[in-house]
Amino acid sequence: MTKQEFLSGKVFRVSNLTSNTFQFVAHEGHSEGSIQRNIMSGDEVILFDHEGNVSKIGSKTFEMYTFVMNKKVKLKYRFDELI
């Protein structure tokens, strides 16, 4: 995946081990956004949920964070590793 595909909201996976997909959702008027998780049944999205907040978008990577049991968890992904 390219940075432009990511920014346009193209659906992606981080692994072939799950059927869930994800996509970037831009927040109007802000440079950041969030990651939406799409819960799938076959090829159909049956539910979507907020996965985390995108805090930084670089030329090759993006950084995100979420909270698990009141602790902030930071993650970094490369665009070219997204499926």
Image: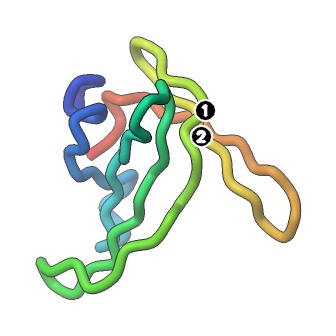
Check the image and name the residue furthest to the front: 29
Is the residue 4 above or below the residue 46 in the image?
above
Residue 64 numbered mark, or none: 2
Residue 55 numbered mark, or none: 1
Residue 65 as seen in the image, left or right of residue 5: right
Q: Secondary structure at mark 1?
A: strand
Q: Quadrant of the N terminus?
A: top left
Tell me the residue at 84%/70% (across/down). Answer: 69
**Where in the figure is residue 60, as x and y percent of width and height?**
41, 17
Tell me the residue at 49%/29% (across/down). Answer: 30
Q: Nearer the viewer, residue 31 or 22?
A: 31
Tell me the residue at 41%/59% (across/down). Answer: 36
Residue 56 as seen in the image, left or right of residue 15: right
**Where in the figure is residue 55, as x and y percent of width and height?**
60, 32
Q: Secondary structure at mark 2?
A: strand
**Where in the figure is residue 45, as x and y percent of width and height?**
22, 78
**Where in the figure is residue 49, as x and y percent of width and height?**
45, 71
Tell me the residue at 26%/85% (across/down). Answer: 46
Snapshot colouring: rainbow
Contact between marks 1 and 2 (CB within 8 A): the answer is yes
User: Given the image, on which type of amino acid does mark 1 rest?
Assistant: Ser
The first of marks 1 and 2 along the sequence is: 1
Residue 24 numbered mark, or none: none
User: Given the image, on which type of amino acid does mark 2 rest?
Assistant: Met
Between the residue at mark 1 and the residue at mark 2, the CA separation in whole angstroms equals 5 Å
Is the residue 39 above or below the residue 73 in the image?
below
Is the residue 24 above or below the residue 58 in the image?
below
